[in-house]
Structures are given as structure tokens and as C-alpha cells.
Amino acid sequence: MNKDYVPNLFGSMVFNEKIMKERLPKQTYKELKSCIDKGKALNINVANIVACAMKDWALEKGATHFTHWFQPMTGITAEKHDSFISPTEDGQIIMEFSGKELIKGEPDASSFPNGGLRVTFEARGYTAWDPTSYAFIKDNTLCIPTVFYSYSGEALDKKTPLLRSMEAINKQALRVLNLFGNEDVKSVITTVGPEQEYFIIDKDLYLKRLDLILTGRTLLGAKAPKGQELEDHYFGIIKPRIAAFMEELDKELWKLGVLVKTKHNEVAPAQHELAPIFTTTNLATDHNQLTMETMKKVADKHGLVCLLHEKPFEGINGSGKHNNWSLSTDNGQNLLEPGKTPAKNAQFLTFLCAVIKAVDEYQDLLRISVANAGNDHRLGANEAPPAIVSMFLGDELSGILDAIENNEKYSAKDKVEMELGVDVLPRFPKDTTDRNRTSPFAFTGNKFEFRMLGSTFSVSGPNVILNTIVAEALSSFADELEGATDFKKALNSLIKKTLKDHKRIIFNGNNYSDEWIQEAEKRGLLNLRTTVDALPYFIKDKNIALFEKHNIFTETEIRSRYEILLENYSKIINIEALTMVDMIRKEILPAVTNYMKNLSDTIIAKKSIGLSNCCDMERGTLTNISNLANNLYTEIEKLDSLLRRVDDYSDPLSVADFYKSLIIPAMEKARSYADSLELLVGKEYWPIPTYADLLYKI
Ligand code: ADP
Ligand code: MG
């Protein structure tokens, strides 16, 4: 059998249902499955049997170690590997793995971000297996997906709140579904399909740029003569070197059970996209983390580097991640799919209205869920959605909602009358709902596409928010409808009221236009342009109340996360600024000096042979360069001394604001001089690869 036969490859490194069924005693499998389905804790006897079977399977696949694989607040995954070896009395070893080791770990966690949650004398963190995500083998290590929490039980990671939010939306969606007579539905899950953008560049060139190495983006660099204006890269033919990388990436991800489906070139030169088929949010999150990690690893094997930063290059598109999101029941209904019967339509409109209400009431939280230093370069620029959260429903669906709100006939081409729970919605083909690519939050036929995520983001954060705010809207709907004597009447007025109160969030026009910014302001929508503008909303009373009500975060956890996010922002800008100072002092200015010396030596040499009137080029260039170099020197000295002033600020918000308001503008100024110099200094003298090198030489 061909070893690359995809059905054999797929999931071959995953301890999934099929393997569990094959390898576990029937009773153990049943108990494990029931724990997974009901989210119950595993008892130690079952855990011992599962651990032993897992170990045997892993050893056969060549594994030597195991690790609890968790997702701390760094946004990447963490692992500490232990080998399976255990000494025997006769000086040999046996390979062991116990149920206790499977279900709980105690990594020393003092160096993970915790926002003041763990004092150093209680630096222990605990990890616990999340059996809803399968164990898998990566680099000869058996990885157990786990949650990560502190001694006193606070979440220190991105998985715990996600699981809590999935539970919250499950609970509230079931309440609403019951009202529509879905007694057979036992659970509701959220589904996510994240489309991932990334850049691929040559590794040798990458290694010549300290900014890429330390910050993941170029801090300097004049635009290449060619950018993305010809739009010839989008869906273009994939270069052989990239194709080879993509082929191996697909295979590695398939082995890990990731449902990788689509790959193509993106708009910017050297930019690409990968999209999997959607799955349960929890798994989609784990898989997206694995995808990002595997992209980097496989690229390296091909002498390439994968840049996941939101804005690696100025002047061309940055990279984002589209979070396709929906709700689905255990009996296979997609709750955001317009139904075929009047009853199903009323149900669809109820869920749709819950999302509308949620997005409007918690615009701030959605904005925060996509806020970081890198994404500030995109949101609001002419490529990504703006920083204003709004929803696209398409003209047809919006028309129907208007008609419902105003008790009017819906008079599109089909001339259908719409009475909730009586009439059938007209079918809207997917393409009429998916035309607007500028919307941050678009209804695309049977799901919503949240398009504001940055490419480095764990999809956990945005989905925690989405799940929680929709759970809240559903909960308020259920509260109102559960007591109603006339359900149909109550539903009708609830839907109308919701549309009236929240229709301001719906915008089907061009989100990149200036008119929209003004219009949004008139509508009272938030325009939180930067991370520093957005984050303070996290700790508003209404948001703390929301998270506490649905058991997502305690107030302590929220405040700790707020601090972590602010500190992360400040640290990133600080590293970027220091890197810039370093590169300009040690690489750019010395190179410029060399070139100036060459020019002035030439002038002197020409003079010595009587050609002093023929030095226009040298003089002109030298004068320009010399002026720019002086300006660059001045700006970099200013930036350097400005950086020291951070000590004047103490609380995390004012520190972050200092970086936003003072450091970023200073960096931009210095960069403009450096980029102008790049256009004048001889190629051989310029010490770092240019944009043309990085984007086209592959
Ligand atoms: P594009 O946005 O480029 O048009 P597609 O429409 O093909 O792409 O879908 C994008 C993503 O949406 C894919 O990952 C797909 O699996 C996912 N998707 C489709 N249906 C759902 C759903 N019900 N829930 C979540 N994601 C979904
Ligand atoms: Mg998309």
C-alpha cells in the first residue's frame, strides 16, 4: 500500500475514537466515551487502562516521551517532555505511563504570564487532560491536550475559558431549542473553520534581518518597485518551492487529524492561505495551534521561513485569520441555516437575532478579542476590516428583517409575505450573502465569518467572546419566552424589539469608506482604533457581570488577563523599538557611512586628477544622504532616550499608552529616514535584504 495514501495517513498520529475502540476494553471505552460526551472527570481505574493503551500505541509509533500540551497566555502552546522510562531492579528500564500521569500534571509554571494571579511562593500550575481533544504524537512525543490552572483554581490558559464558554452556549441554546419543541436535541456545539494567512520567505535572507528574527516583522524597508498592484499573486500558480512545502505541510497536518482542505496564494506577494474543514471549536482551536506550529517547522525543513505576524511588510497586505462560526446540534442541525419549514425559520430568525443583539451589545468585547500590537497595523488600514465592529447580512436578509420589524410585506423579487412561524423564508443563494468582503462580521449563508482576527491569534479568545455573548443573548430570550402564555406572539414581539434596538449594528455597505466611519459614529458604534483604546473596556462592569454570570471568568481572572494583554502590548513595542535602535546604529548608519566615504573618496580622487567640475552625482547624492543620515541619527538618539522614560509610568495602562502615543510615532519617524536612505545607498552597501529580495527571491 502506498504509504502516502491519504486515508491511511489521516489521523495516523492521533489516539482517536477508532484507535480507542480497537485498543480499549469495551467497558473502558464506554466509560471514557461517556466522560467525553458528558464532560465528566475520569476515574483513576479507567485512566490507568487508557494510559496503558495509549502508551503501547505511542511506543509502536516510535514515541519515547509524553507531555501535557497546554495553551498558556503567551498565545502559543507549551510542553515539557518526560520520557516513559522507569528503572527496574536489575538495572534495566521499562516503559511506563500511569493514569495519574495522564490526567494531571504539575509543571513549574512560574515563568508563564499570569497577571498577578500566582505569587512566586505558590508558583505551581496544574494541567488536566481535556479528553474532548484527542491525544496525538508529535516529534516522537505523546501529547496530551490539557487545561492549565493555578493552585487556587484560576484559569491560566486559553483552553479553560473556551470549554467554559462552550458549556455556557450549550446550556442557553438548549433552553431556546426546547421552546421550539426540539426535545430530541441533547447538546449544542459551536463549530469553527479558521482560514489562516501567512507569508513564506527564504531562510538565508531571513537570517540577515534582526527585525524578522526578533520581532517577526520588518521594522525598516522601502517599498519594492512592485507591490500587489497587479493583483497577479492572488490565486496565482504556486511556485515549485512553495508547492513542495505545502505538500509536506498537508501531509503532516493530515497525520495529526487536521482536516486541511484548501491552499492558495493570497493577495500580497509571498503570501498564502490554508483553510481546514470546520470542526468543534475546541478541536478547531487545538488544530489551528498545531497548524501554525507545523507551518513553521515544515518551512524550516525546506530552507524557508513562515511569517505569521499580522504585518510583516509595510505597504502590502498583512495577514489575518477568518473565524467561520456556527452552532450545531447533536442531531445535525446547523442552527444558522435558514430552514425549510415555517417553524424552522422562526427558530433560525431567533438565533440570528440573538447574534445581532450579542454583537451590538458587546462590540467592545469582540474588538478586544482581536486586539494586539500586530493587529493594530491592520484593522482600520485599507486591507482588513476597520476597527469598527458591524455586521453584514446582505440586502435580501436585511430586507426580510426590515419587513418583519415594520409589519410590512417583504417585496423582493419573490414577493413573499413574512410572518414569523407562518411563512417560509425565501432561499437566498450563498453568493448573494457573501459579496461584501469588507465586513468584519459577515453572514455567509449558514454561518458567520468573523474577519478581524490577526494571523498570530489563537482562535480561542475570539470564540470565548462569541460563545459567551451569544449565550447571554439566548439566555435573555429564553428568560422572556419561557414564561409566555402565547409563545408565537411573544416571539414576534421579541424579534421585532430586538431588530429595532440593534439594527444599528447591521451595515451592508463598504466598510473601508470614510463615510462609514462618520455614519458609524452617528449610529453610536464604537471605533476603538488601537489595542490601548480597546482594552480598558474589558474591565467594564457590564463585561465583568457577563463573564461572571456565565462562569467564564471570575473578576480576578479578568483583571489578570487585562494586565497580561496590556503588558504584552508594551513588551512587544519595547522589543521592536530596541531592535530598531540596534539595527540603525550597528548596521544602517555604518553602511551609510561606508557609502558616503566611497562618494567623498571619489570626489577627492576626481579632484586630484583635475575633474572637480564633474562631481555633480557624487556631491548631490552625498548631500542628500548626509542630510538623511543626520536626521536618522537625531531620531534614533531621541527614540533611545525616550525609551528610558518608561520608568515615569507605573500602571500597565499608562505604560501601554506611553508606547502607543510616544514610542510608535518616534519609530515611524526614524523609519521614514532609514527607508529614504535605502533608496539612495548602493545595493552592495545596504546591509540587509530589501523588500524586493524578501518578497520575490524564492
Ligand atoms: P471562503 O470564505 O474563502 O469563501 P468557504 O466558504 O469555503 O471559504 O469556507 C470557509 C471556511 O468556513 C471553511 O473552513 C469551512 O469549513 C468553514 N465552514 C463552513 N461551514 C461552517 C459551519 N457551519 N461552521 C463553521 N465553519 C464553517
Ligand atoms: Mg473567508
Image: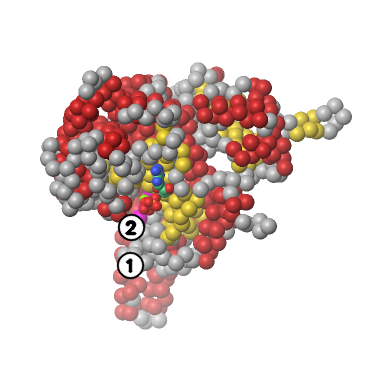
Label 1 lies in ligand 1 vicinity (Cβ under 8 Å)? no
Q: Using the rendered view, name the quadrant where residue 221 is placed.
A: bottom left
Please give left or right for residue 508 compared with residue 613 in the image: left
Q: Image quarter for residue 374?
A: top left
The reply to whether residue 661 is in sight is no
Q: What secondary structure characterizes most of the magenta part?
A: loop
Tell me the CA gap for discs 2 and 1: 14 Å
> Which residue is under mark 2?
315
- Dot 1: what SS? loop
User: Magenta segment range?
Assistant: 314-320
Q: Position of residue 105 (x, y in %)?
A: 61, 26
Q: Which residue: 56% across, 50% down?
A: 254
Closer to us: 171 or 562: 171
User: Does 319 appear in magenta?
Assistant: yes
Q: Residues within 10 Å of mark 1 (few under 14, many from 20)?
A: few
Q: Amino acid at mark 2?
A: Gly
Identify the residue position indicated by label 1 in the image. Answer: 230
**Which residue is painted at 56% across and 27% down in the image?**
34
Location of residue 135 by image quarter: top right
> From this viewpoint, is residue 135 visible?
yes
Residue displayed at 42% across by 52% down: 197
